[in-house]
């Protein structure tokens, strides 16, 4: 029977320690090789938490599935902030250009409930609300209103 281990690891910096080592060790596979493979596949998400699924079949074959980091992590990386605002409704900690919002929306589109880029961008902007990041110098709520008003239709087409 195949075993599946799902963990969040720091991109490009996974180790054989917890949570991976204790979960993979009893499965009888080369943990170091798996960790090295995870680090190669998550290197582009350096510093962000990345969801990883490790599947080990009966013959000890390992299949890795690397997910996309949470939207919050992507927003904070693009905005260049370490952590979100403690008071996101009153204090902004960073600003995202619309291009960054679109890039994140395209990256996360598969895992979102959105059916087009415009609504996906609004979902990303919704995350900006809770993190305390502005979009194009506007509060995220104002940016969502601008999208609804058609202000950025050309870019979001």
Image: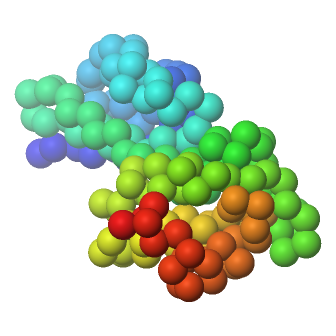
Residue at 20 percent across and 29 percent down: it is: 62
Please identify the quadrant where the C terminus is shown.
bottom left
Position of 77 compared to 8: left or right? right
The colour scheme used here is rainbow
Q: Position of residue 124 (x, y in %)?
A: 54, 65
Image spot of residue 52 (x, y percent): 38, 41
- The quarter in which the N terminus is drawn is top left
**What residue do we see at 49% from left, 66% from top?**
121
Tell which of 15 and 24 is nearer to you. Answer: 15
Q: Quadrant of residue 40?
A: top left
Tell whether 85 sits left or right of 150. Answer: right
Does residue 14 show up?
no
Number of dots carrying numbers: 0
* As drawn, 142 above or below 10: below
Identity of the residue drawn at 47% across and 28% down:
44
Taking the spot 13% from the left edge, 36% from the top edge, the residue there is 57
Say whether residue 66 is left or right of residue 57: right
Q: Residue furthest left?
A: 59
Residue 26 visible in the displayed image = yes
Which of 131/62 is in front?
A: 131
Give the x, y percent position of residue 131: 73, 62
Residue 119 image position (x, y, % from top left): 43, 75
Q: Is residue 118 above or below residue 49?
A: below
Q: Measured along the vertical axis of the image, is residue 16 above or below residue 81?
A: above
* 16 w.r.t. 67: above or below: above
């Amino acid at each position: 029977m195949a075993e599946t281990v799902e963990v969040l690891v720091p991109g490009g910096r996974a180790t054989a320690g917890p949570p991976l080592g204790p979960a993979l060790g009893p499965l009888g596979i080369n943990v170091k090789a798996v960790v090295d493979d995870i680090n190669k596949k998550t290197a582009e998400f350096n510093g962000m938490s990345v969801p990883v699924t490790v599947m080990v079949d009966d013959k000890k074959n390992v299949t890795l599935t690397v997910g996309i980091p949470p939207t919050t992590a992507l927003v904070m990386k693009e905005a260049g902030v370490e952590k979100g605002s403690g008071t996101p409704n009153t204090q902004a900690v960073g600003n995202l250009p619309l291009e960054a919002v679109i890039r994140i929306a395209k990256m996360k589109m598969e895992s979102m409930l959105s059916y087009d880029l415009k609504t996906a961008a609004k979902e990303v902007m919704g995350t900006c609300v809770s993190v305390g990041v502005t979009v194009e110098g506007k509060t995220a709520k104002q940016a969502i209103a601008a999208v609804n008003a058609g202000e950025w239709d050309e870019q979001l087409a």
